Image: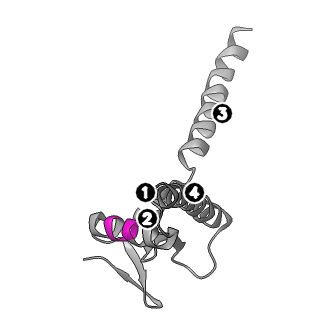
Amino acid sequence: MRSASRRLVPLRAGILLLAWAGAAAALDLDGAKSQGLVGERTDGYVAAVAPAPSGDVAALVADVNAKRKTTYEGIAQSNGTDVDKVAALAAQKILSSAAPGTWIFDGGRWYQKK
């Protein structure tokens, strides 16, 4: 019995490691930006840099944009202004504070912030 339980320890550790690695591999906006998968648009939203993004990247972009739109709508409503104006102001702030190397989509093209 002792040897069987000793053999299970590495197996349990391996399973825990795989579970942790899966959680760590979950894509977040900062990670996707640093990997060059996602960039900022000049309209206050994000986009996938590659023309055919993975499902994870597409889902992340959709989630981030939905949350931003909800935030922009709330701000616009409370200030009696247009949501596009709020998004444009947010874009200015986001782009000005973006790290060098961040991908930015402007005028139909992608470039990296210097």
Q: CA distance from mark 3 to mark 1?
A: 27 Å
> Along the polypeptide, which appears first: circle 4 or circle 1?
1
Residue beneath label 4, please? 70
Residue farthest toward the top in the current orientation of the protein: 1
> Would residue 107 be found to the left or right of residue 13 on screen?
left
Q: Secondary structure at mark 2?
A: helix
> Would residue 3 be found to the left or right of residue 39 on screen?
right
> Which residue is pictured at 40% across the width and 77% down the height?
104
Residue extent of the magenta highlight:
89-93
Q: Secondary structure at mark 4?
A: helix
> Along the polypeptide, which appears first: circle 3 or circle 1?
3
Q: Hey, which quadrant is residue 40 in on the image?
A: bottom left
Whether the residues at callouts 1 and 2 have beta carbons within 8 Å, the answer is yes
| Residue sitting nearer the eye, 108 or 18 | 108
> Would residue 106 be found to the left or right of residue 53 on screen?
left
Question: What amino acid type should be assigned to the residue bearing mark 2?
Answer: Lys
| Residue sitting nearer the eye, 4 or 67 | 67
| Residue sitting nearer the eye, 76 or 23 | 76
Q: CA distance from mark 4 to mark 1?
A: 20 Å
Q: CA distance from mark 4 to mark 3?
A: 39 Å
Q: How far across and down, in percent of the image, does residue 51 sit? A: 59, 82
Q: Which mark is residue 33?
A: 2
Q: Secondary structure at mark 3?
A: helix
Question: What amino acid type should be assigned to the residue bearing mark 1?
Answer: Asp
